[in-house]
Image: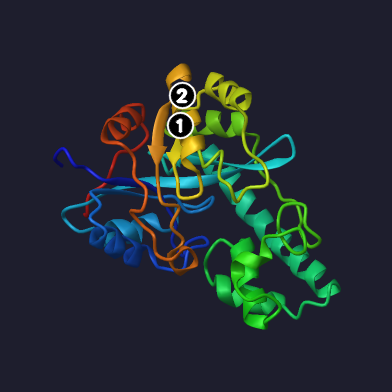
Amino acid sequence: MGDAMRADLHVHSDASDGTDSPAEVMRRAALAGLDVVALTDHDTVAGHAQARNALPDTMALVPGMELSCRLEDRSLHLLAYLFDPDDQELAAQTRRIRDDRVLRAGAMVGRLADLGVPVSWDQVAAIAGTSVVGRPHIARAMAASGVIAEPGEAFTADWIGDGGRAYVDRYALAPAHAIRLVRAAGGVAVLAHPRAERQQWQASDEQIAALAATGLAGVEVFHPDQPESQRARLLGTCRELGLVATGGSDDHGSLTGHRIGAETTPEDSYWRLTAQASGNQPLRRE
């Protein structure tokens, strides 16, 4: 792939809460000059087959997933890569998370109705389609109703932000359990955007060290929502703990301004990460 290999290891499609199909995501990744892209939809691998079939000859696909976890009553996400997609225990846990997402979204729509927001479950379901339903789908319905100007405004204490008036908790894995599941399936786990400014809570150095002790492979350092000061701190933490520093755009299509390729993983980090996996491998078009 050459010395200037570009790998975006955090991308979403409409298999979860992105706006573009997996095939369209691959097309945009190629246009962005990427050599490697990881499809990391929330708690599902449903988009992988379409993504692989749409790969250009110049690009490899890292099969991945963004796992919903909870640490000390706070939401935390793990990026899982190159696990065996047929691993029964990991598949059972992600199925439980997806099922609970539907119940949770319905409960939030109910709370919004109590607050006078004219959004129905049918609207949210129509926006989600066959995707794993999530808060961004509710936010899009709220924007369509005119109660907010754009979907980002939904993620506040007034509405469906963590702990907000219409927020409802959901089933999520303890991160140590999730890391063990991913490792047992031959995959590697990376802590997603632990210091993103948009988050109401950020993982501490001590919490990252505790996760490293349970088998965490890396930390997402290069992310659009993480300022340079935090990136420098996280790089130091990675060096101290022997963790891989990764990067990705966290692109959600039009919701994030089609920013695929905006952040990438250093080439040496990519090879260190993939060398630790045994459950799957980067894929080329069949």
Residue in front for this viewpoint, 43 or 218: 218
Left or right: residue 215 versus residue 152 is left
Q: Look at label 2 and name its amino acid.
A: Gly
Question: Which picture quadrant has residue 165?
Answer: bottom right
Q: How is the image coloured?
A: rainbow
Quadrant including the N terminus: top left
* Mark-to-mark CA distance, 1 and 2: 6 Å
What residue is rendered at 50% in x and 44% in y? 226
**Residue 53 visible (yes or no):** yes
Q: Mark 2 points at which residue?
A: 236
Residue in front for this viewpoint, 72 or 133: 72
Tag 2 secondary structure: helix
Left or right: residue 4 versus residue 156 is left
Q: Where is residue 78 in the image (x, y as percent from the top left)?
A: 53, 40
Question: Which picture quadrant has residue 194?
Answer: top right
Report the residue that reaches farthest toward the left.
2
Asked if the residue under mark 2 is in contact with the one under mark 1, i.e. CB atoms within 8 Å, the reply is yes
Q: Mark 1 points at which residue?
A: 232
Q: In this view, does 75 lie above or below 110?
A: above
What residue is rendered at 37% in x and 34% in y? 279
Left or right: residue 276 versus residue 122 is left
Left or right: residue 211 versus residue 174 is left
